[in-house]
Image (cartoon, grey):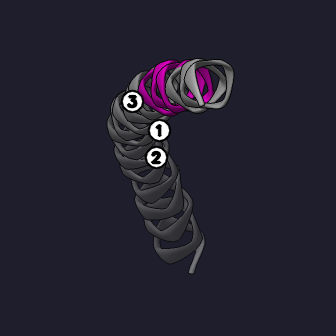
């Protein structure tokens, strides 16, 4: 009986170690994906700001010209 409890304890300990290592790997993968998403959002924000300024400049120039 004691040996069975000891075996279960060891089994749970190994499962805990395995689960923690898998969670670390998942966390690293999620961090990489969030970095990619953040980078894409930054590029889109820069692009949209530049486009807004360009279109605004064209509209102002057209108004002044007319």
Residue 23's label in the rendered image is 2
Quarter-of-image position of residue 36: top left
Residue 65's label in the rendered image is none
Q: Residue at x 40, y 23 (%)?
A: 43
Which dot, 2 or 3, sits closer to the camera? 3
The dominant secondary structure in magenta is helix
Query: Measured along the vertical axis of the image, is residue 5 above or below residue 36?
Result: below
Query: Magenta residues, as a range?
Result: 47-57
Which residue in the structure is indicated by mark 1? Answer: 27
Quadrant where the N terminus sits is bottom right
**Residue 6 percent across, percent down from the top left:** 53, 60
Disc 3 crowd, CA 10 A, few/some/many (<14, 14-19, 20+): few
Quadrant where the C terminus sits is top right
* Mark 3 residue element: helix
Asked whether residue 7 is drawn in magenta, I would say no
* Mark 2 residue element: helix
Which residue in the structure is indicated by mark 3? Answer: 28
Which dot, 1 or 2, sits closer to the camera? 1
Query: Measured along the vertical axis of the image, is residue 45 above or below residue 12?
Result: above
Q: Earlier in the sequence, mark 2 or mark 3?
A: 2
Callouts 1 and 2 close, C-beta under 8 Å: yes
Q: Could you give the CA–CA distance between mark 1 and mark 3, rounded to whole angstroms? A: 4 Å
Q: Residue at x 59, y 33 (%)?
A: 59
Q: Could you give the CA–CA distance between mark 2 and mark 3, rounded to whole angstroms? A: 9 Å
The residue nearer to you, when weighing 56 against 33, is 56
Disc 2 crowd, CA 10 A, few/some/many (<14, 14-19, 20+): few
Query: Measured along the vertical axis of the image, is residue 23 above or below residue 39?
Result: below
Disc 1 crowd, CA 10 A, few/some/many (<14, 14-19, 20+): few
Q: Residue at x 32, y 38 (%)?
A: 29
């Amino acid at each position: 009986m004691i040996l069975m409890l000891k075996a279960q304890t060891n089994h749970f300990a190994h499962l805990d170690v395995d689960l923690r290592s898998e969670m670390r790997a998942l966390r690293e993968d999620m961090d990489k994906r969030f970095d990619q998403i953040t980078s894409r959002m930054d590029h889109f924000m820069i692009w949209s700001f530049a486009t807004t300024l360009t279109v605004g400049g064209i509209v102002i120039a057209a108004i002044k010209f007319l």
